[in-house]
Image (spheres, helix red, strand yellow):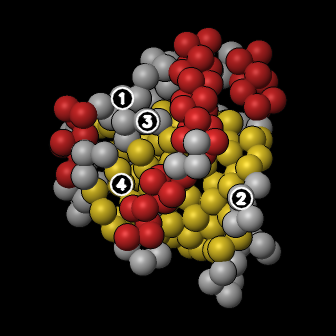
Amino acid sequence: MPKRACNVRCATGKTSANGKEVQKIMDGETLKLYRKRIIPEECKYLKDDKILRVDDEVIVTSWNTINPKLDFSHGCSIYYLQQGFKVSKFYRQDNTVLYWYCDIVDYDYDEAENILTVTDLLADVVVFPDGQVRVVDLDEMADALDKGLITPELLSAGLHRLNSLLAVIYRDKFDRLQSPIEQLGL
């Protein structure tokens, strides 16, 4: 497991997996995905995630929870490479939908190793089956800035991405973000 994927410090405030670099991610067979969290600090190789689709716009995966949870057991995710967010569908053990969980993220792509590190920028949006929307963890963004864990530029980029995501949801266009998963019958 390459350690340097987790040593990448996100500081640019820009989604590193831009259109030109994303073309090089096209080899989904060898692509390695890492999830990096700022609070709590951790970086995990998502070795058991199944990569279902890779193109210049999205990566779609299915997964089981890394640590057992009472309220959900598995799900699938869409990494929006240009927009800087990840949209995940969380399922209960009985395969019913618990909710959609949207992470604001930053990407760093290591072309030589074919590694995509996805850094969680802390702000999240939960969309419940009844349409209720909840924005969570904004306090963690402020804490990360106060502790020097993220730069002001990255905080700003995260807030702009959050605003873009909320605009899609509030315009009743969230189904467009769900469609890569729905098209696969997941």
Image position of 136 (left or right of 19): right
At horizontal 35% and vertical 50% (from top left) the residue drawn is 58
**Amino acid at dot 3:** Gln
Reading the chain from its start, which is encountered first: label 3 or label 1? 1
Reading the chain from its start, which is encountered first: label 3 or label 2? 3
Label 4 secondary element: strand
Distance of mark 2 from mark 4, alpha carbons? Answer: 25 Å
Name above or below for residue 154 compared with residue 4: above
Residue at label 1?
16
Kindly tell me whether residue 173 is visible in this rendering.
Answer: yes
Q: Residues within 10 Å of mark 3 (few under 14, many from 20)?
A: many
Reading the chain from its start, which is encountered first: label 2 or label 4? 4
Q: Residues within 10 Å of mark 2 (few under 14, many from 20)?
A: few
Distance of mark 3 from mark 2, alpha carbons? Answer: 22 Å
Distance of mark 3 from mark 4, alpha carbons? Answer: 12 Å
Label 2 secondary element: loop
Q: Residue 59 shows which numbered tag?
A: 4
Residue at label 3?
83
At horizontal 23% and vertical 63% (from top left) the residue drawn is 29
Reading the chain from its start, which is encountered first: label 3 or label 4? 4
Outermost residue on the bottom side: it is: 94
**Where, by quadrant of the figure, is residue 68 drawn?**
bottom right
